[in-house]
Amino acid sequence: MEDDIINTIFANTEDGRMYLSNFRNKEEKNQQSAIAAVNDILEDVRKNGDEALVKYTNKFDSKKVGRDNILVTDREIENAYEMTDNEFIEALKTAAQNIIFFHEKQKRNSWMVTKDNGIMLGQQVRPLEKVGIYVPGGTAAYPSSVLMNALPAKVAGVKDITMVTPPLEDGTINPKILVAADLAGVDKIYKVGGAQAVGALAFGTETICKVDKIVGPGNIYVAMAKKSVYGFVDIDMIAGPSEILIIADETANPSYLAADLMSQAEHDVLASAVLAVTSEKLAAEVKRELLKQIKYLKRKDIIIQSLKNRGAIFIVDSIEKGVDLANEIAPEHLELCIEDPFPVLGKIKNAGSVFMGKFSPEPLGDYMAGPNHVLPTSGTARFFSPLSVDDFIKKFSFTYYSQKSLLEVGDKIVKLAEAEGLTAHANSINVRMK
Amino acid sequence: MEDDIINTIFANTEDGRMYLSNFRNKEEKNQQSAIAAVNDILEDVRKNGDEALVKYTNKFDSKKVGRDNILVTDREIENAYEMTDNEFIEALKTAAQNIIFFHEKQKRNSWMVTKDNGIMLGQQVRPLEKVGIYVPGGTAAYPSSVLMNALPAKVAGVKDITMVTPPLEDGTINPKILVAADLAGVDKIYKVGGAQAVGALAFGTETICKVDKIVGPGNIYVAMAKKSVYGFVDIDMIAGPSEILIIADETANPSYLAADLMSQAEHDVLASAVLAVTSEKLAAEVKRELLKQIKYLKRKDIIIQSLKNRGAIFIVDSIEKGVDLANEIAPEHLELCIEDPFPVLGKIKNAGSVFMGKFSPEPLGDYMAGPNHVLPTSGTARFFSPLSVDDFIKKFSFTYYSQKSLLEVGDKIVKLAEAEGLTAHANSINVRMK
């Protein structure tokens, strides 16, 4: 039957959670096996530097990249601009302006607070010094993601941004990626990808400098390599396949809903597009629209596989039930295609990015609106946040006490230190109280 | 010779870095071997829940803990208060007030911004729902750390705080730990530690609820278990041995400097206490003070081993050279025992917590001042930050566009989506532009 492209489920929240947790658990198992593979590569890069880097690049990506041409030259960037049409560059510039506008609002000041007895306490905010950005190659080469990763770092004040991305077989990089990197102010671009690129950024090689933090999406090998080096450097998050949950009421337009489900599904056969709708009639209309619109879409096969295996239409009793579902599954993207989305915002606990109303579809956020499109996936919005300026700063605290203010609390400090058996801690206070 | 207790090194920054990186690299190797051991335990807890939890608790900690008494009862907490002296409780309350005062300043508002054409963008801030706190047992059982981990979560608005801590051999918990947990508002306390406790918090068992984030220090097995579950839940950071760097000029008091070095060294034979001082004469006096004061300290043997193997006095040409050293090694604790510390603050790039002047010794920060004492170690202050309210919140963004404002940028979105080969993304905009 034609409408088998997506399942309809009459569902309460628990069903939704079970449905999604089925394939989320599969992800976790794939992760375990990838970890072993990447650890060998990481160790090799750590020990053998550039030699290992070039070896894996030749093996996995291109035989035309060696130590002497692994760094992208100014000339290559100039060529990339020549190969790229102006309308695209203009659109990218508008996007960049909007991204900068939004992320500027995230900037935080250092602060301090004084007390009447002269005590001064504070928190100093500093940009990270060196950041590495991973950009996938091949079919998943997204110039928009270059902006989304590099611009928040720029806004935060990071002075040294290194980008790594796997070369095409002919040893070149997609020119649109190079243009986006140049517009975003990336300092150095290396033609290297996979776990080997993550290793180079984490440990440094003769050519590539060790960074403080590695951000950016990648396949499961890249994700597991990032997890493996976490602690030696910081990372943004562990990214999984992309997801959307759309909550719709009777006022929603079935054509929009179908289009939005498919825009999510086209990312990946593992992507998950779920609609929670209060109307059975609308659900049926959405199914018809899916079949109508899909004919014209390039990535039809991916969409069908994604919708069949990981998509669903849930019929829910009320918008509240849809919200419960959202809070339960913590979707990466959440569209509120309902008449009045604002009163619902305060009820959302777990989501990566929320799109309010009929005319705020997810691709608006992917490309143009300004909020970051690097978002927590697979339910991690319960605890992870969208990539932001916060990811590119670090904080430290400071404490100033005068002799008098120290004396006022000295006995209590000594009491606590002694209770923990730390007499040298107590001594450090006692020598000052003589 | 007596003064062999610590080495004096005439050093520039590079020497300092090399000196410290020697034992930092050792840490990394220990980590690799611990990972394999903890993964088996984690997998067992994940599969077998409470049964595995009790099995490992009986094996490693106490034979007196089973499923029926793994949760600490109200009665046990009442008893703990009775066993604890009032002065200690009062000191703990003062500390709690100061910690709350400082962390209240870290709270952040949700925000939104509108544009003239009606666009609305924003960032919503939400507390995490469930947090797990790991508290070490045995000799490293620190009530002060209970406050430092639990209170920022409370201030952030976390409603469900679970604490895990390994029982003593007789099946009890240190009463001071229980009192601190109760004062800090911890909701549930379980008598379980090690990798098995981390597994229970990450995956949930019949008794213990899965949490969103696990924080708190522990030994290398706990640290590696946290790393292993990172991504399934969030974690605070990977903690290593404790460190201090003291920068001192001629005005510093050698007795204070010696006391502060030893207060760091007493934590652990792996702890590192380093003094960078501009005066050779003062360095010699510090050495004499070390020998004088150490006699009265309980943890003398640990201090000697720590200072000999991982301590150092660097003679530097100037305070600036000391600052360079700090920025290079990114110490967990940084004391500025210099005449005028404030002009130096702006030059500090990498540190966990900075202590300003003679009367702000590190133990003041460990127990009383208010800033968090859970700090990035082993050079990770380059990219990690002190534990803070930020660790217990998550953010999501939201986007509202009207039809008109979407139409204004629709063509550009379509252009970018098509450039990335994502025609279903373009379609989601196109259906709204008809």
Image (cartoon, coloured by chain):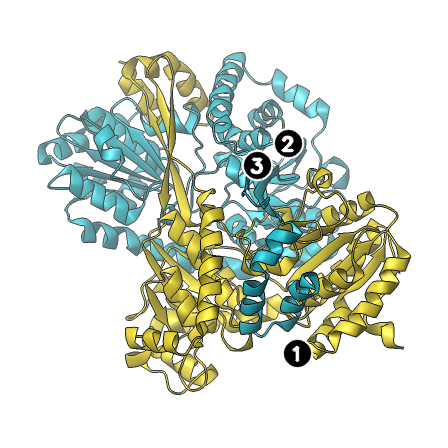
Chain colours: A cyan, B yellow
Dot 1 and dot 2 within a common chain: no
Q: Nearer the viewer, residue A15 or B154?
A: B154
Dot 3 and dot 1 within a common chain: no
How far from the left and from the top, in percent, is residue B404? 30, 12
Give the labeled residue for mark 1.
Answer: B298
Give the labeled residue for mark 3.
Answer: A110
The answer to whether B61 is drawn above or below residue B128 in the figure is below
**Neighbours of disc 3 within 10 Å: few (<14), some (14-19), many (20+):** few
Q: Nearer the viewer, residue A197 or B105?
A: B105
**SS of the residue under disc 1:** loop
The answer to whether A294 is drawn above or below residue B283 in the figure is above
How far from the left and from the top, in percent, is residue B152? 44, 52
**SS of the residue under disc 3:** loop
Give the labeled residue for mark 2.
Answer: A172
Distance Cα–Cα, label 1 vs label 2: 64 Å
- Residue A223 left/right relative to A78: left
What chain letter is assigned to the residue under label 3?
A
